Image: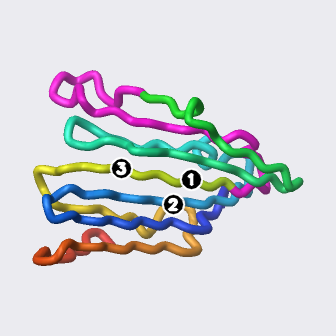
């Protein structure tokens, strides 16, 4: 075990007009050096019908040093070079101080008006998850149906 996910939280809000706002939070404790590269970085994807409103990160090292990302720390990149997916991009942020014993946290918000109304929630990961939380808020008149796959 290289890291433990202390919190994985996902809140989805569906508005009257079909716009969806997703807010997420994640906190990870790095246990081994092998986890520094993935635990200290968060990437949020978007495309032509979605956008990332904000993406932030912070860390508290085992020595008590605190770090926080600034808006200039957020980078953007294309996810695919294939023409059909040319609008697929990602914003990512790397948090300073991500080393063994550090607790790393992230918050993000994305907004979309999708063609298909579905949401995914990964309550399990390859690393252990101490607490996972999903919340859905629907506008009046909307209803939901849940399906579980491969779990």
**What's the residue at 40%, 45% (across, down)?**
53
82 or 91, nearer to the observer: 91
The answer to whether 67 appears left or right of 55 in the picture is right
Q: Residue 19 carries which label?
A: none
User: Which of the two discs, 1 and 2, labels the residue nearer the N terminus?
Assistant: 2
**What's the residue at 47%, 67% (across, down)?**
9
User: Which of the two discs, 2 and 3, labels the residue nearer the N terminus?
Assistant: 2
Residue behind mark 2: 25
Residue behind mark 3: 110
The answer to whether 17 appears left or right of 12 in the picture is left
Q: Is mark 3 on a helix, strand or loop?
A: strand
Q: Label 3 to label 1, Cα distance in Å?
A: 13 Å
**What's the residue at 29%, 73% (across, down)?**
137
Vertical position of residue 99 compared to residue 125: above or below: above
Give percent across and percent down for residue 8.
51, 65
Residue range corresponding to the magenta coloring: 77-103
The answer to whether 14 appears left or right of 116 in the picture is right
Give percent across and percent down for residue 115.
11, 50
Vertical position of residue 42 compared to residue 86: above or below: below
Q: Badge 1 local density, few (<14 within 10 Å), some, or many (20+)?
A: many
Q: In which quarter of the image is residue 3?
A: bottom right
Q: Badge 2 local density, few (<14 within 10 Å), some, or many (20+)?
A: some
Q: Is the N terminus in the top left, top right, bottom left or bottom right quadrant? A: bottom right
Q: What element carries label 2?
A: strand
Q: Which mark is residue 106?
A: 1
Q: Quadrant of residue 16?
A: bottom left
């Amino acid at each position: 075990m290289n890291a433990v996910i202390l919190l994985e939280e996902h809140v989805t809000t569906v508005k009257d007009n079909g716009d969806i706002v997703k807010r997420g939070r994640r906190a990870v404790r790095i246990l081994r050096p092998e986890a520094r590269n993935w635990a200290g970085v968060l990437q949020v994807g978007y495309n032509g019908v979605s956008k990332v409103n904000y993406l932030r990160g912070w860390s508290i090292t085992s020595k008590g040093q605190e770090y926080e990302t600034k808006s200039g720390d957020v980078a953007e990149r294309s996810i695919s070079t294939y023409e059909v997916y040319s609008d697929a991009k990602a914003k990512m942020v790397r948090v300073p101080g991500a080393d063994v014993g550090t607790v790393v946290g992230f918050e993000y918000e994305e907004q979309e008006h999708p063609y298909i109304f579905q949401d995914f929630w990964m309550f399990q990961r390859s690393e252990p998850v101490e607490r996972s939380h999903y919340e859905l808020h629907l506008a009046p008149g909307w209803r939901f149906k849940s399906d579980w796959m491969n779990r």
